[in-house]
Amino acid sequence: MVDATHRAGGVIPPAEVPELELYHPKSWWTTYVFSQDAKVIAIQYAGTAMAIGLVALMLSWLIRLQLGFPGTFDFITPDAYYQFVTMHGMIMVIYLLTALFLGGFGNYLIPLMVGARDMVFPYANMLSYWIYLLAVLVLVASFFVPGGPTGAGWTLYPPQALLNGTPGGQELGIILMLVSLILFIIGFTMGGLNYVVTVLQGRTRGMTLMRMPLTVWGIFTATVMALLAFPALFVACVMMLFDRVLGTSFFMPALVEMGELTSHGGGSPILFQHLFWFFGHPEVYIVALPAFGIVSDLISTHARKNIFGYRMMVWAIVIIGALSFVVWAHHMYVSGMHPLFGFFFATTTLIIAVPTAIKVYNWILTLWRGDIHLTLPMLFALAFIVTFLNGGLTGLFLGNVVVDVPLSDTMFVVAHFHMVMGVAPILVIFGAIYHWYPKITGRMLNQQLGLFHFWVTFVGAYAIFFPMHYLGLVGAPRRYPELGGTAFIPESVADLNAFISITAFVVGFAQLVFLFNLIWSLRYGKEAGPNPWRATTLEWQTPTTPPPHGNWGDERPVVYRWAYDYSVPGAPQDFIPQNDPWPDKPLTRPA
Amino acid sequence: MTVALVLVLVVVGSILFHILSPWWWTPLASNWGYIDDTIIITFWITGAVFTAVVLFMAWCVLRYRHREGVRAAYQPENKKLETWLTIGTAVGVAAMLAPGLYVWAHFITVPDGAAEVEVVGQQWQWNFRLPGEDGKLGRSDARLVSFENPLGIDPDDPAGQDDLVIEAADLHLPVDKPVKMVLRSIDVLHDFYVPEFRAKMDMVPGMVTYFWLTPTRTGTFEILCAELCGVSHGFMRGTLMVDTEQDYRAWLQGQSTFAQLSGSRQTGMVEEAGQ
Ligand code: HEM
Ligand SMILES: [Cu+2]
Ligand SMILES: [Cu+2]
């Protein structure tokens, strides 16, 4: 490993050399397990997130078994069904997507892309991962305790979540769920502060904020949002834990549980909903903004064209981030909150559509007059635009208060949020993995397997979730283990449900092919070289691939230009790395 | 080629599915046709945007696919284009929001003459209460719920004595008369949802919520619970019948008041105890 600290008179003042020595790992344990290297932590985060995500995927199969073929599988009791749905939703949103985008991509890409050697607080960064792992283990433990995990829905609405009549309500399930969330938030905060401070303080010379790749902007803004939004969930969890364990009544009014009056009184279930969605809506964008950023870079790189309207894109990210704190109650139009709120929240919600639409336009305007290479990352980016656009447009139904009234709590909602925050960000994750895997491992992922994975996932996911909107239009409520003999629901709905289920199994299978590809290519993938996509951003300019601890060898790069100098007129090649001073000299390196 | 083709197929397939599939909303049975209209407007606008954007993308993929020797254009910004797109989007959004808010204003303004009907949710059945002769519902509180008084009606409030209590049975409404559905729960969240009415609203313990509607055709409708309320949420069904004025009167005659019910239940208890 090249060690920066040994270069006399180098970038690092000699007085600091002994301290830096301390920071380098000395043993196998500190290199690979209790590592403080953001890249190793990134892989730990990503590996754990994908492992638990696999559980969530398998839970979706169980859910679809029941919905597609109700009454066929005896082991899926209503209790079990609700537990599957709850755990599926919670794992997907928090433990997979949030952890993978911020803990995984954030850790790997932020230091490399801004030209830093590592995160600013490596020790806290390491703790962040281990606390996240603990949170996951507590979550997993809830599958094995008496009564099983909570079945309260991923929204955990009290009073139902804390009572008999809901799986895990009066058993351990809900307690473990709340404890796990509290741990997750503590762990996240340690990592999150790192990402923010590193972006603000750790950038290399020349890397101004307005030269940062949009990936960094997306992850940065999402992290700031998460740091502001998670505390609402944190206090909600603590208060709810008190209600459940100490008998307080923050969220519990006087009520009857299975015929018996409980000792609770005076609390407000709606207060919980406000706290939950004050976190929950920004959460949608905590997942979406990193995806926005990453997909912008994928499109620009693989269309060999600068991102269209960069400044507009940055401002759109920031404005969306800010506005998303004043729209939360669009999840509560029919919750019984004061009806006048509807005017305010519908207006703010539809206003967000404008900066969001600008992002979509700018992506396709980047394709326009580009030099489009249909690589796997590009294919996933295109698929993302389609699904995100689709999901964003159905958001205009649900955001427009009165239109939400018939649709809320139906399968329309399930279809909408899967398109927009399930399928769309996951497509970006795949695109991003195909894109950065060569940097992380030094090898390319297999193209044939990748194409199979792409087509099945894109077409399949669209075929699952597009028709699902129409179940909601018919009036089928969500969170029903079966629709039963309901007069207004035509028989043919059962066929549609069976079709969706079978498609879901096929799409699920394709994910196993992807996992196989990840492992297989580690050994047998084509050698990638340092910059296989001929990209401009700093992570592709490291002296060694994969980059070692410290990232940059002797000297940190100096940045001369923005991240999008593709196809610059007059340049001898169709990309100019950010750390290239051309036309003042270099740019002789082989393309 | 393939990619552009699939993108076109996604658009064409989605539109055909929309037009041809048998899955569409159930025939309306209330005054909330406005809501259906707003959904239709939204479908047109969003459908047009989806079609335009995806087709444009397909064209770009086809036209600007990588060819040897061709470079991408270098164009970081285009102020004019960006401004026009922003304005166009804002207009489209306003075209959906304006009717939406207009109808919402209707939705939350209960007309003066609306009759009150109370729905009381409980795991996992529907109960109802109608005001008696006095036209007023008596006070209620979950703390008063007991076997004799399943809805927690305050026995000390004279307004409650003549209230009609309908426990776990069908609810009837007269056709063409506006009703304010007053919603309450004695245990957890529920949501009163009749798809043909289009309207729904959560029922929250400790609170009273409401919405209003005018049933516009007679018939039998299913009541579903639309807010997760525990394991039997999916099975929490009820029946609502919209009657002609005459049938409705006849049905009303058959209902018992709170005073009658609590009297008979108490004597029933005494008799049981005496045996
Ligand atoms: C192939 C992949 C997936 C399939 C087939 C699938 C299917 C489902 C189904 C059938 C439901 C239950 C609907 C209901 O009756 O209420 C559900 C709920 C949910 N899913 Fe997925 N899902 C998938 C991936 C995802 C992803 C990637 C996310 C990440 C955002 C996600 C988030 C959720 C959430 C939040 C819920 C709601 C849980 C609740 O109601 O409490 N799902 N999913
Ligand atoms: Cu939201
Ligand atoms: Cu329910």
Image (tube, coloured by chain):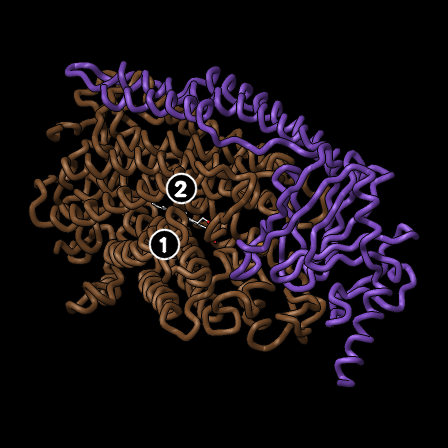
Q: Residue at x 21, y 23 (%)?
A: A574
Q: Is residue A432 left or right of residue B35?
A: left
Residue A481 appearing in the image:
yes
Question: Considering only order in the chain, which callout, 1 or 2, is on the residue closer to the N terminus?
Answer: 1
The quarter in which the C terminus of chain A is drawn is top left
Whole-angstrom CA distance, mark 2 to mark 1, is 14 Å
* Chain letter of the residue beneath label 1 in the structure image: A
- The residue labelled by disc 1 is A72
Residue B18 image point, x, y percent: 46, 25
Quarter occupied by residue A443: top left
Can you tell me which quadrant of the image ligand 3 is in? bottom right
- The hue of chain B in the figure is purple
* Chain letter of the residue beneath label 2 in the structure image: A
Instruction: Tell which of A109 and A140 is nearer to you.
Output: A140
Q: Are marks 2 and 1 in contact (CB under 8 Å)?
A: no
The residue most toward the front is: B275
In this rendering, the answer to whether A322 lies above or below B3 is below
Q: Which mark is residue A418?
A: none
Three-letter code for the amino acid on which mark 2 is drawn: Asn
Q: Is mark 1 within 8 Å of ligand 1?
A: no
Q: Residue at x 28, y 34 (%)?
A: A380
The residue most toward the bottom is: B274
Three-letter code for the amino acid on which mark 1 is drawn: Thr
The quarter in which the N terminus of chain A is drawn is bottom left
Q: Which mark is residue A497?
A: 2
In this rendering, the answer to whether A444 lies above or below A268 is above
Residue A517 image point, x, y percent: 16, 46
Quarter occupied by residue A587: top left
Q: Is residue A358 left or right of residue B6?
A: right
- The hue of chain A in the figure is brown
